[in-house]
Amino acid sequence: MEYELVVLFEHPEWQRPLWAALERRGVRYAALDLKKAAFDPDAIPAAALYFNQASPSAYVRGNTRAVPLALSLMRSLELGGARVLNGTRAFLLELSKSAQAALLRSLEIPHPPSSAF
């Protein structure tokens, strides 16, 4: 594999401490900026491990394409055999308050009432 780790991100300021730690440890990593990225869905993953750092609030910063691109890319990577931390299952849960409420209910965890529309 080309890299040990690929970090998917849309907000570079949030990543600086992570990148500094990876560099100190000599980790071969790549940073994939979801604001500018494109990918080949048939390509073999370039790393065994990917770390999704995309934020559902990307649209607030004008990065509206980051979330759907992250989801599409992560699904492709997962189907290609790569391990993705904060992958599609976790990210979809983060995107949906109704899914969060359903999970909390299924785990019998008290939570504030909510309405989906």
Image: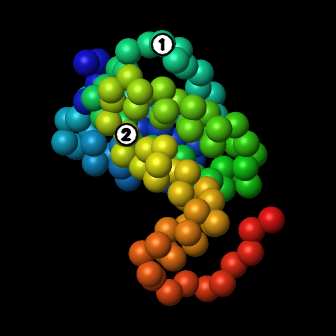
Q: Nearer the viewer, residue 40 or 35?
A: 40
User: Secondary structure under badge 2?
Assistant: strand
Which residue does the image show at 59% across and 26% down from the upper left? 37
Q: From the image, which quarter does the N terminus lie in?
A: top left
Which residue does the image show at 63% across and 28% down from the upper left? 36
Q: Amino acid at mark 1?
A: Asp
Q: How far separated are the C-alphas under marks 1 and 2?
A: 17 Å
| x and y percentages locating residue 69 in the rendered image | 61, 33
| x and y percentages locating residue 24 in the rendered image | 22, 43
Task: Name the residue tied to disc 1.
Answer: 42
Farthest residue in the front direction? 106
Q: Nearer the viewer, residue 8 or 15?
A: 8
Q: Amino acid at mark 2?
A: Val
User: Secondary structure under badge 1?
Assistant: loop
Task: Name the residue tied to disc 2.
Answer: 84
Q: Crowding at label 1, few (<14), some or many (≥20) Cα neighbours within 10 Å?
A: few
